[in-house]
Amino acid sequence: MLTKRIIPCLDVDQGKVVKGVNFVNLKDAGDPVELASFYNQQGADELVFLDITASSDERKTMINVVERVSQKVFIPLTVGGGIRSVSDVRVMLESGADKVSLNTAAVLDPNLIKESSEHFGNQCIVVAVDARRIDRESEINLEQDSGLFINPGLSIEKSTKWEVVIYGGRKRTGIDVLKWIKFVTELGAGELLVTSMDSDGMQHGYDIELLSKISELVSVPVIASGGAGNLDHLCDAIIDGKADAVLAASIFHFGTYSIKEAKQHMESKGIPIRL
């Protein structure tokens, strides 16, 4: 069995690492270069750098920060936020990223996934999906809520439990998460970064139901994101959610647990991990 991965996430806003709850109420968590170096030394398996306001602010990813981070880490680095074209993907890879994460831009132009995968190989292309649970009791008519409805074949039905949201959770799309996951994998996504918007920052655990359904649908690696509050949550995402990797921020950024403690705990639960 392949070893599972622990991936700290650096959500960056205006040059600082931040962490919030449900994508809002952001708190300063430190300098991205210093944190990247720290996690590299601690034994993290990979690192994810997300410029979380690049898309909503309609600007490019902060290349200078990516370059500085890449100089400090010797583990795979995934970069996302504000990447809208194949040339943007090339710039990020040339700046030191090993993989590029596509989220909002992939929804607005799914062909970007296919073109990027063909140019650079699907091992470089991570599609990030921000999922929001649909509350049927309080649900309003999506057609009146500026849903995108880009592809009718991907749209929400009565049985849909999760909707894709974009622009850092600020905009609904009308797209069924499970349909979207299958679609982007067929287009060439080499990996999926799945974040539960409802669980993000809550520290009550990942959305295991969402993870397990996605893992059963696709053959590419799935990274669990959103909700880690203790070390058992990491194990639950792997064992019950069938994820290939766990991404976390708060529990590492604020010193609740170390990467070493997380790996030792996962090993004690029988999860194959690189110590």
Image (spheres, rainbow, N blue to C red):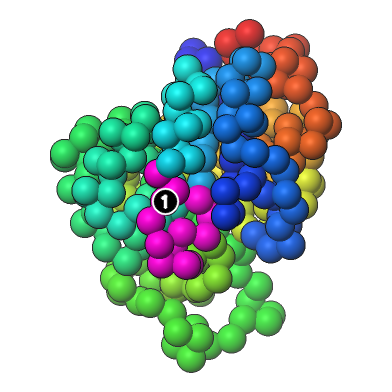
- The residue depicted at 74 percent of the width and 62 percent of the height is 25
User: What is the three-letter code of the residue carrying label 1?
Assistant: Thr
Q: Position of residue 220 (x, y in %)?
A: 38, 34
The dominant secondary structure in magenta is loop
Say above or below: 256 vs 114: above
Residue found at the very far right of the displayed protein? 256
Q: Was residue 55 drawn as part of the magenta stretch in this picture?
A: yes
Dot 1 falls on a residue whose secondary structure is loop
Magenta-drawn segment: 51-63
- The residue depicted at 50 percent of the width and 51 percent of the height is 51
Q: Judge from the rendering whether residue 177 lies leftward or rightward of residue 240; answer left or right.
A: left
- The residue depicted at 56 percent of the width and 65 percent of the height is 169
The residue that disc 1 covers is 61
Screen quadrant of the C terminus:
top right
Q: Position of residue 216 (x, y in %)?
A: 46, 39
Say above or below: 258 vs 13: above
Q: Judge from the rendering whether residue 214 lies leftward or rightward of residue 227; answer left or right.
A: left
* Residue 178 visible from this viewpoint: no
Q: Judge from the rendering whether residue 264 lies leftward or rightward of residue 221; answer left or right.
A: right
- Asked where in the image residue 30 lies, by quadrant, the reply is top right
Say above or below: 137 vs 23: below
